[in-house]
Amino acid sequence: MTKYAFNPATYAPRTPESVRAVLACPTLSRLLFPARIHTGPKTSIQLRSAMDFDVAQVPKAYYSSDGTLVNIPVDGENGIGFSATIHLREVAGTRFPNTVNLDFTRDHLDAGIVTLADLKALLVEVIPAFKAEEGSVFDLKRPRFPHPSGGTASEPRRYTMNADGRSYPISLEWISYFGPELLALTGRERFDRLRTCAEKYELHDGIVVILQDEPFDRTDPAHRERLARAEAELGLAELVRA
Protein backbone atom coordinates (compact mmCIF):
# COMPACT_ATOMS: atom_id res chain seq x y z
CA MET A 1 0.00 0.00 0.00
CA THR A 2 1.53 3.30 -1.12
CA LYS A 3 1.92 5.93 1.58
CA TYR A 4 1.90 9.68 0.98
CA ALA A 5 2.87 12.75 2.97
CA PHE A 6 2.01 16.43 2.86
CA ASN A 7 5.17 18.08 4.14
CA PRO A 8 5.49 21.89 4.49
CA ALA A 9 8.68 23.28 6.04
CA THR A 10 10.03 26.60 7.26
CA TYR A 11 13.15 28.08 8.79
CA ALA A 12 11.00 30.76 10.43
CA PRO A 13 11.06 30.40 14.23
CA ARG A 14 8.20 28.20 15.41
CA THR A 15 7.18 27.07 18.89
CA PRO A 16 5.30 23.98 20.06
CA GLU A 17 2.33 26.26 20.73
CA SER A 18 2.21 27.16 17.02
CA VAL A 19 1.17 23.59 16.20
CA ARG A 20 -2.39 24.36 17.33
CA ALA A 21 -2.78 26.93 14.52
CA VAL A 22 -1.85 24.24 11.98
CA LEU A 23 -4.19 21.68 13.56
CA ALA A 24 -6.97 24.27 13.41
CA CYS A 25 -6.73 24.65 9.63
CA PRO A 26 -10.22 23.58 8.42
CA THR A 27 -9.20 20.92 5.90
CA LEU A 28 -6.52 19.41 8.12
CA SER A 29 -8.93 19.32 11.06
CA ARG A 30 -11.61 17.58 8.99
CA LEU A 31 -9.15 14.93 7.78
CA LEU A 32 -7.46 14.28 11.15
CA PHE A 33 -9.95 14.56 14.01
CA PRO A 34 -10.97 12.82 16.21
CA ALA A 35 -7.41 11.88 17.11
CA ARG A 36 -5.10 11.08 20.01
CA ILE A 37 -1.61 11.68 21.34
CA HIS A 38 -0.11 8.55 22.86
CA THR A 39 1.40 9.14 26.28
CA GLY A 40 2.40 5.55 27.02
CA PRO A 41 1.99 1.98 25.77
CA LYS A 42 -1.66 1.91 26.82
CA THR A 43 -2.49 5.56 27.52
CA SER A 44 -3.34 8.49 25.30
CA ILE A 45 -4.87 11.96 25.24
CA GLN A 46 -8.08 12.20 23.22
CA LEU A 47 -8.38 15.17 20.87
CA ARG A 48 -11.79 16.00 19.44
CA SER A 49 -10.48 19.16 17.77
CA ALA A 50 -7.48 21.48 17.70
CA MET A 51 -8.88 23.26 20.76
CA ASP A 52 -8.10 20.15 22.82
CA PHE A 53 -4.41 20.35 21.92
CA ASP A 54 -2.39 21.46 24.95
CA VAL A 55 1.37 21.56 24.53
CA ALA A 56 1.75 21.12 28.30
CA GLN A 57 0.36 17.59 27.90
CA VAL A 58 2.91 16.54 25.29
CA PRO A 59 5.01 13.78 26.93
CA LYS A 60 8.60 14.60 27.81
CA ALA A 61 9.63 11.57 25.75
CA TYR A 62 8.81 13.54 22.61
CA TYR A 63 11.49 16.13 23.46
CA SER A 64 15.11 15.43 22.52
CA SER A 65 17.45 14.71 25.44
CA ASP A 66 19.44 17.88 24.71
CA GLY A 67 16.30 20.03 24.59
CA THR A 68 16.88 21.21 21.04
CA LEU A 69 13.70 19.89 19.42
CA VAL A 70 10.33 18.27 19.95
CA ASN A 71 8.50 15.85 17.67
CA ILE A 72 4.75 15.78 18.30
CA PRO A 73 2.78 12.89 16.74
CA VAL A 74 -1.02 12.94 16.52
CA ASP A 75 -2.84 9.83 15.28
CA GLY A 76 -6.24 10.21 13.63
CA GLU A 77 -8.82 7.51 14.20
CA ASN A 78 -9.26 7.07 10.44
CA GLY A 79 -5.62 6.10 9.93
CA ILE A 80 -4.39 9.54 8.90
CA GLY A 81 -1.41 10.70 10.95
CA PHE A 82 0.06 14.10 11.78
CA SER A 83 3.42 15.08 13.21
CA ALA A 84 5.28 18.32 13.85
CA THR A 85 9.02 18.68 14.36
CA ILE A 86 9.86 21.99 16.03
CA HIS A 87 13.44 23.11 16.66
CA LEU A 88 13.52 24.87 20.01
CA ARG A 89 16.95 26.38 19.50
CA GLU A 90 19.68 26.33 16.88
CA VAL A 91 22.62 23.99 17.24
CA ALA A 92 25.97 25.36 16.07
CA GLY A 93 26.91 24.04 12.66
CA THR A 94 23.45 22.67 11.81
CA ARG A 95 20.48 24.21 10.04
CA PHE A 96 17.25 22.22 9.95
CA PRO A 97 13.78 23.54 9.12
CA ASN A 98 10.68 23.15 11.23
CA THR A 99 8.28 20.73 9.55
CA VAL A 100 4.78 19.34 9.79
CA ASN A 101 3.57 16.16 8.13
CA LEU A 102 0.16 14.78 7.28
CA ASP A 103 0.47 11.09 6.37
CA PHE A 104 -2.16 9.14 4.43
CA THR A 105 -2.34 6.18 2.05
CA ARG A 106 -3.46 5.29 -1.44
CA ASP A 107 -6.51 3.70 0.18
CA HIS A 108 -7.53 7.12 1.54
CA LEU A 109 -7.19 8.56 -1.97
CA ASP A 110 -9.06 5.71 -3.69
CA ALA A 111 -11.90 5.93 -1.16
CA GLY A 112 -12.23 9.68 -1.60
CA ILE A 113 -11.35 10.34 2.05
CA VAL A 114 -8.47 12.50 0.82
CA THR A 115 -8.92 14.19 -2.57
CA LEU A 116 -6.79 16.37 -4.82
CA ALA A 117 -9.07 19.26 -3.86
CA ASP A 118 -8.23 18.58 -0.19
CA LEU A 119 -4.50 18.65 -0.92
CA LYS A 120 -4.81 21.96 -2.76
CA ALA A 121 -6.83 23.34 0.16
CA LEU A 122 -4.10 22.22 2.59
CA LEU A 123 -1.61 24.34 0.65
CA VAL A 124 -3.92 27.35 0.87
CA GLU A 125 -4.50 26.97 4.62
CA VAL A 126 -1.35 25.46 6.14
CA ILE A 127 1.32 27.48 4.34
CA PRO A 128 0.38 30.81 6.01
CA ALA A 129 -0.52 29.14 9.32
CA PHE A 130 2.93 27.56 9.56
CA LYS A 131 4.81 30.32 7.66
CA ALA A 132 5.98 27.56 5.31
CA GLU A 133 8.70 28.46 2.80
CA GLU A 134 8.24 25.31 0.74
CA GLY A 135 6.19 22.15 0.79
CA SER A 136 5.19 19.10 -1.20
CA VAL A 137 2.93 16.07 -1.42
CA PHE A 138 4.91 12.94 -2.27
CA ASP A 139 4.80 9.16 -2.21
CA LEU A 140 7.03 7.73 0.48
CA LYS A 141 8.07 4.58 -1.37
CA ARG A 142 11.11 5.41 -3.51
CA PRO A 143 12.38 2.55 -5.71
CA ARG A 144 15.94 1.37 -5.24
CA PHE A 145 18.48 1.38 -8.07
CA PRO A 146 22.01 -0.06 -8.45
CA HIS A 147 24.64 2.10 -6.75
CA PRO A 148 28.10 2.59 -8.33
CA SER A 149 29.77 1.48 -5.09
CA GLY A 150 27.74 -1.72 -4.99
CA GLY A 151 24.32 -2.69 -3.68
CA THR A 152 21.30 -0.47 -4.20
CA ALA A 153 20.18 2.96 -3.03
CA SER A 154 16.95 4.95 -3.11
CA GLU A 155 16.74 7.89 -5.47
CA PRO A 156 17.71 10.88 -3.31
CA ARG A 157 15.91 14.20 -3.13
CA ARG A 158 17.98 17.09 -4.49
CA TYR A 159 18.65 20.36 -2.70
CA THR A 160 19.97 23.83 -3.30
CA MET A 161 21.43 26.16 -0.70
CA ASN A 162 21.18 29.86 0.06
CA ALA A 163 23.96 32.17 1.25
CA ASP A 164 23.09 31.41 4.89
CA GLY A 165 23.65 27.68 4.42
CA ARG A 166 19.96 26.78 4.48
CA SER A 167 18.99 23.89 2.21
CA TYR A 168 15.80 23.79 0.14
CA PRO A 169 14.52 20.80 -1.87
CA ILE A 170 14.32 21.30 -5.62
CA SER A 171 13.11 17.85 -6.65
CA LEU A 172 9.62 17.91 -8.14
CA GLU A 173 7.05 15.78 -6.34
CA TRP A 174 3.41 14.96 -7.09
CA ILE A 175 2.56 18.44 -5.78
CA SER A 176 5.27 21.02 -5.10
CA TYR A 177 5.09 24.50 -3.58
CA PHE A 178 8.03 26.81 -4.28
CA GLY A 179 7.79 29.74 -1.86
CA PRO A 180 9.33 33.18 -2.49
CA GLU A 181 12.59 32.30 -0.68
CA LEU A 182 13.05 29.22 -2.87
CA LEU A 183 12.06 31.08 -6.04
CA ALA A 184 14.76 33.63 -5.28
CA LEU A 185 17.26 30.75 -5.56
CA THR A 186 15.75 28.98 -8.58
CA GLY A 187 14.57 32.00 -10.57
CA ARG A 188 10.85 32.41 -11.25
CA GLU A 189 11.35 32.65 -15.01
CA ARG A 190 12.30 28.97 -15.40
CA PHE A 191 8.71 27.99 -14.58
CA ASP A 192 7.57 29.73 -17.79
CA ARG A 193 9.06 26.84 -19.78
CA LEU A 194 7.38 24.08 -17.75
CA ARG A 195 4.82 22.29 -19.92
CA THR A 196 4.72 18.78 -18.44
CA CYS A 197 2.28 19.27 -15.58
CA ALA A 198 -1.44 19.18 -14.87
CA GLU A 199 -1.51 22.57 -13.13
CA LYS A 200 0.85 25.46 -12.46
CA TYR A 201 -0.39 28.49 -10.54
CA GLU A 202 0.56 31.31 -8.18
CA LEU A 203 -0.09 30.89 -4.45
CA HIS A 204 1.13 32.85 -1.41
CA ASP A 205 3.71 34.73 -3.53
CA GLY A 206 5.06 31.38 -4.71
CA ILE A 207 4.29 28.79 -7.38
CA VAL A 208 2.46 25.47 -7.09
CA VAL A 209 3.17 22.69 -9.59
CA ILE A 210 0.84 19.67 -9.76
CA LEU A 211 2.54 17.05 -11.87
CA GLN A 212 -0.60 15.04 -12.66
CA ASP A 213 -4.18 14.67 -11.47
CA GLU A 214 -3.92 10.98 -10.55
CA PRO A 215 -1.86 9.97 -7.50
CA PHE A 216 1.81 9.90 -8.39
CA ASP A 217 3.52 6.53 -7.99
CA ARG A 218 7.31 6.63 -8.23
CA THR A 219 7.40 2.88 -8.92
CA ASP A 220 5.42 3.41 -12.16
CA PRO A 221 7.85 3.87 -15.11
CA ALA A 222 5.42 6.15 -16.96
CA HIS A 223 5.12 8.40 -13.89
CA ARG A 224 8.90 8.52 -13.48
CA GLU A 225 9.29 9.42 -17.16
CA ARG A 226 6.80 12.28 -16.76
CA LEU A 227 8.67 13.50 -13.69
CA ALA A 228 12.03 13.41 -15.49
CA ARG A 229 10.59 15.38 -18.42
CA ALA A 230 9.17 18.06 -16.12
CA GLU A 231 12.42 18.41 -14.16
CA ALA A 232 14.37 18.66 -17.41
CA GLU A 233 12.11 21.46 -18.61
CA LEU A 234 12.79 23.32 -15.38
CA GLY A 235 16.53 22.60 -15.49
CA LEU A 236 16.57 21.65 -11.82
CA ALA A 237 19.71 19.52 -12.03
CA GLU A 238 21.86 22.60 -12.65
CA LEU A 239 20.68 24.08 -9.34
CA VAL A 240 21.87 21.30 -7.04
CA ARG A 241 24.10 22.73 -4.32
CA ALA A 242 23.77 20.23 -1.48
Image (spheres, rainbow, N blue to C red):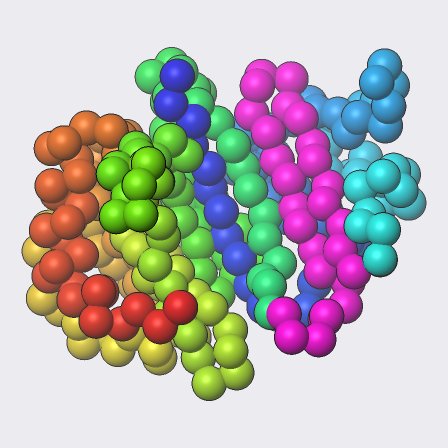
41 sits left or right of 87 in the view? right
Quarter assignment of residue 17: bottom right
Q: Give the residue displayed 64% in from the left and 24% down from the top.
A: 76
Q: Position of residue 227 (x, y in %)?
A: 18, 46
Q: Residue furthest bottom?
A: 163
Is residue 35 among the parts visible in the rendering?
A: yes
Q: Position of residue 239 (x, y in %)?
A: 27, 72
* 91 magenta-colored: yes
Q: Position of residue 53 (x, y in %)?
A: 80, 39
| Residue stretch in magenta | 67-94
Is residue 124 among the parts visible in the rendering?
A: no
Q: Quadrant of the C terminus?
A: bottom left
Q: Give the residue displayed 15% in from the left and 49% down from the top.
A: 228
Q: Quadrant of the N terminus?
A: top left
In the image, residue 207 above or below residue 31: below
In the image, residue 98 above or below residue 60: below
Q: Give the residue displayed 25% in from the left and 48% down from the top.
A: 148
* 9 magenta-colored: no
In the image, residue 142 above or below residue 55: above
The one nearer the camera, 234 or 127, is 234
